[in-house]
Image (cartoon, rainbow, N blue to C red):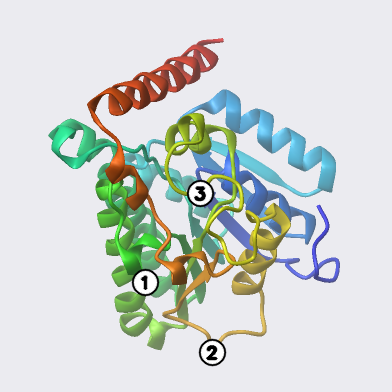
Amino acid sequence: MELMFRDGLLKGKRILVTGGGTGLGEVMAEAYAQLGASVYICGRRASVLDETAKRISDATGANVKGIACDIRVAEAVDDMISQIWADGPLTGLVNNAAGNFISRTKDLSPRGFNAIADIVFRGSFYVTLGCGKRWIDAGDKGSVISILTTWIWNGGPFTVPSAMSKAGLNIMTKSLATEWGPNGIRLNAIAPGPFPTKGAWERLNPEGSGGGNGGVGIPMGRVGHMPELANLAVFLMADGCEYLTGQTIAIDGASHLTAGNFSSLARLGDAEWDMIRNQIRGANEKDKAQRSV
């Protein structure tokens, strides 16, 4: 990966990336490892984590370890963090694990809502709290980055569970930046625009429906490139910007300034929504089949 930073910038850093086995999490984990950090990645699928950890380790020569953990379960999170701390304290955490799908809110069930909120909202808090308590008790400094969306500013029609959960993490970032600032703990967030990844793209952009298809509606005329996101994630985790905390930074080619989201889906009727649900269901079934292989 082509990064803008000097080699060895993150040497001595120990960073956990939740949801680090695939997608944006994998990209950030590789960037940290490439610059010398020891990296932990967690997720629910041990086989995916092991494969990703081996690939990144082989490519970078860094120490990358995968730990299977369902962050929806507070006890599992505490066990994972205790396992990591047995090797030494973390210096950084990236709250990247997420889930999302498009749906009319009137069609949502409580189970569908909780499928997103339990990961994004509750799970991210569990991991942040587990790391923060240990940092404070030991007098260690730490840096937390949460991956949000630009919907925290302009709303998230048809993605309400995600928008609500990400908005909660935005306020967590600001609140804990103030509360934990005296302890030398920084919290910031990144709100990416469209950075297409296979799993998320199939659920949020089936057949090109809705917002974010290619560069349409984005002032810069294109979607994001992965190294651009990785560079920002490295900057926020590196030494040299210790005075930067409590901020959420958009990296979206200015698309959120045009109120870009999934509002265009309001024009769809029942038939189109049935088609979208079937496409999302097919993507989920495909994912489950891959997990069982």
Q: Who comes first in sequence, dot 1 or dot 3?
A: 1
**What amino acid is found at the position of numbered circle 2 in the picture?**
Tyr
Q: Is residue 181 above or below residue 63?
A: below
Helix or strand or loop: what does disc 2 sit on? loop
**What amino acid is found at the position of numbered circle 1 in the picture?**
Thr
Q: Nearer the viewer, mark 1 or mark 3?
A: 3
Q: Is residue 170 visible?
A: yes
Q: Which residue corresponds to mark 3?
A: 212
Q: Residue at x 70, y 65 (%)?
A: 231
Q: Which residue corresponds to mark 2?
A: 243
**Real-space Cα distance between discs 2 and 3?**
34 Å
Residue 255 on image: x %, y %: 51, 65
Q: Residue at x 18, y 31 (%)?
A: 111
Q: Which residue corresponds to mark 1?
A: 173
**Real-space Cα distance between discs 1 and 3?**
26 Å
Towards the viewer: 224 or 18:
224
Helix or strand or loop: what does disc 1 sit on? helix
Label 3: how many residues lie within 10 Å, few (<14), some (14-19) or many (20+)?
many
